[in-house]
Image (cartoon, rainbow, N blue to C red):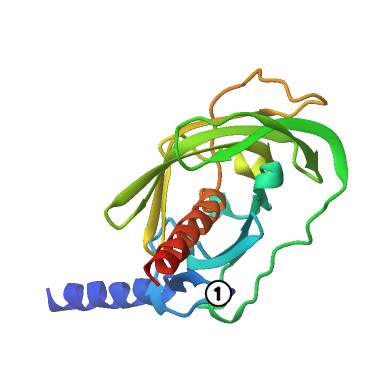
Amino acid sequence: MQASLGICLLLAVVARGTALQCEVCMGLGHNCTGEIETCPSDHEFCGITVFESEREEVKVNGIVKNCVPSSVCGAGSADINIGKKGRSRTTMFCCKDNACNRASVVTLPRLDTKLNGLQCPACYTSSSESCQDDTVDCVGAEAHCIDLAGYVYSGETSQEVAMKGCATEAVCAATVGGAATFTSVSSAITKLECRAATSTAGLALSRPTGFFILVVVGLLLIQLSTQQLCSLSSGL
């Protein structure tokens, strides 16, 4: 009995010793620091996700470090281009050594601004579930059109949001109903349609799909930070 107990304890120690451990944190800017945590068995990599969002000359950068499953690695850069209203980009780095995401530095790939001959309907609103279409010329690897709606939550407040624009293939990767939380902001997607872009901004849609939700959260953070600045100004 004692021998069996000793073997079980030894196996537990060995199993714990071989489990991957990663730094876990999130924050605005280009880096964050957090605790080293043991990953679940189905999360085989340490990940670093960075995003950059621009809207009306306001820019927000953010970073997330955590344990990730292999299915999210190698997806490439997830970009949304909503024309004059702005753009948001996200990329992920994966590694498989303990705490390998602590010292690694990840930067977004250089933005390819070369027109690719494709177009999509484009718009953005933070006050309803739909917005009036403009047209945006897609660039680089942006070969898909998205039509998205959802909610963003900050504290006790909620806000509807809708957007359309060009997107890279990696954007069409999750499902409707997806949710994400970044610092004090969370979002929930209620509508997401993705189709191949064409040489004209047509409206024929294919099956609903999804994307890296941080691309949207970045745009929402800009909206919330602008509102907070306006509130502070009005109180002076």
Label 1 crowding class (10 Å Cα cut-off): few <14, some 14-19, many 20+? many
| The residue positioned farthest toward the top in the image shown | 204
> What residue sits right under mark 1 in the picture?
101
Whole-percent x and y of residue 8? 24, 72
What residue lies at 78% left-to-right and 39% top-to-bottom? 138
The answer to whether any part of residue 168 appears in the image is no
Determine whether the residue tagged by mark 1 lies in a helix, strand or loop.
helix
The answer to whether any part of residue 54 appears in the image is yes
What residue lies at 53% left-to-right and 48% top-to-bottom? 216
What residue lies at 62% left-to-right and 77% top-to-bottom? 104
| The residue positioned farthest toward the left in the image shown | 1
What residue lies at 30% left-to-right and 58% top-to-bottom? 155
The quadrant of the image that shows the N terminus is bottom left
31 with respect to 140 (left or right): left
Marks counted in the figure total: 1
Whole-percent x and y of residue 139? 81, 44
201 with respect to 15 (left or right): right
Q: Is residue 232 above or below residue 202?
A: below
Q: Quadrant of residue 70?
A: bottom right
Q: Nearer the viewer, residue 56 or 60?
A: 56
Which residue type carries mark 1? Asn
